[in-house]
Image: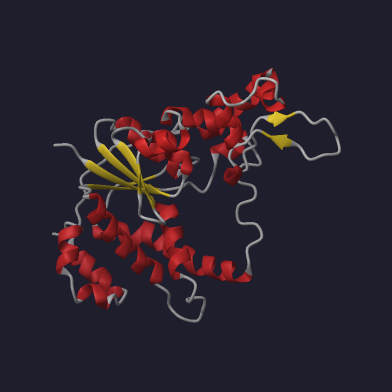
Amino acid sequence: MKQRILILDLLAVLHTIKFSLGKNRLSENEKHTFIIYGFLMKLNFLIKKTGANQIVFALDSHSSKRKELYPTYKEKRGQNRTEQQIILDNLAHPQFEKIIDYVLPTIGYRNLFGSEGFEADDSIGRICKKYPNEQIVICSTDHDMYMLLTNNVCMLNAKTNNYYTITDFEREFKIPSKMWKRVKAMGGCASDNIKGVEIPKSDPTKKQMHVAQTGALNYLTGKMKSTTKAYKAIESRAGKNIINRNKALVILPMRGTPDFTIRPDHPSLRKFIQLCVEYQFDAILENIHPWKQVLKLK
C-alpha cells in the first residue's frame, strides 16, 4: 500500500498561524499559547484534508550554507519591522520552539527532519527524491518548491489551504516543473535576495537591472527577442556564470543535504490529553474523540 505523506514546512506553517491569530494578542503580560493551540487545530485540519497516513515536519537550520556561498543571501529578511511585529515575534518564537522541542515529541511524532546549514526546503527535496513512488503533499507557502512537483508530489498552500499540482503549474507557467530551477537560477529570487542575470547599463548613473522571473520565463518559452539586452545578457559568459552561481543556491535539495528515513510514529492519547490539560485546551478536551481518530492516538 502506498503511503500518503504530508510534509509540513514547519516554520512557514507556524508563521501563517502567527499572522492569522496574532493581531489581537499583543499583550506581553499574560501567558501565551495561542500558536500552540492554532497549530494543533491546523494539524488536525491538514491530516483530515489530505488523508495522510504519515506526517513529516521539515525544519530550518540556524546557520546557512547558502550564506557561506552568497553573503547577501536573505540579507533583507526581518528589516523594517514595526513595533507590533517585533512584539508579535517575541510572543511567537518561544511557542515555535516549544512546538518543535516539546509538543510534537510528546504527542509521539518522530519525523522532525533538519540538518545544520540546510533549510526545510532541502529536507523536503531530499524526501521527495528518496520516496518518488509515494503520494506526497507539501504544505508550504514557498514557490521555490514548484521544482519538486511531479505526478506524485503536489503542494497545499499553508495560507489558502488550496492544492497546487503539476497540472496547475504547467497551465500557469507553460513549462515543465523541472525547468523551474532554471527560472530561479536565471531570474534570481527577490525574497531570498538572490540577484538574477545582470543586464548591462547604457547609463552608469542608473540602477543596475537584472533579469527577473518574468524575463527568465520569456527566455525559456521563446518569447524573448534575441536582439534585447536581456537575451544577450543571458547568453553571455557573465550571464552563464551568474546562472551557475545561482544553481548552487536554488536547486532543491542543495548539494550535501543528508539523507532522511521516515519512521513510524507512535502518537499517544494519554500524552496528548496530558498536553491539553497542561495548556488548558478545554475545547479540545471536551470533544476528544475526533482528535483520537484524526491523529491516530492510541
Which quadrant of the rendered structure holds the C terminus? Answer: bottom left
Please provide percent x and percent y for residue 76. 64, 50
70 above or below 35?
Answer: above
Number of callouts in the render? 0
Tell whether 166 sits left or right of 241: left
Please provide percent x and percent y for residue 75. 64, 47
The residue at the point 27 percent across, 59 percent down is 45
Please provide percent x and percent y for residue 213. 58, 36
Tell me where residue 100 sits by quadrant.
bottom left
Compare residues 65 and 41 and report the one nearer the observer: 41
Residue 54 visible in the picture: yes
Tell me where residue 200 sits by quadrant.
top right
Tell whether 112 sits left or right of 18: left
Which quadrant of the rendered structure holds the N terminus? Answer: top left
Which color scheme is applied?
A: secondary structure
Tell whether 263 sits left or right of 207: left
The residue at the point 36 percent across, 66 percent down is 38
Tell whether 297 sits left or right of 34: left
Please provide percent x and percent y for residue 241. 65, 22
100 above or below 222?
Answer: below
Compare residues 121 and 263 and report the one nearer the observer: 121
The residue at the point 40 percent across, 39 percent down is 123
Residue 248 visible in the picture: no
128 above or below 12?
Answer: above
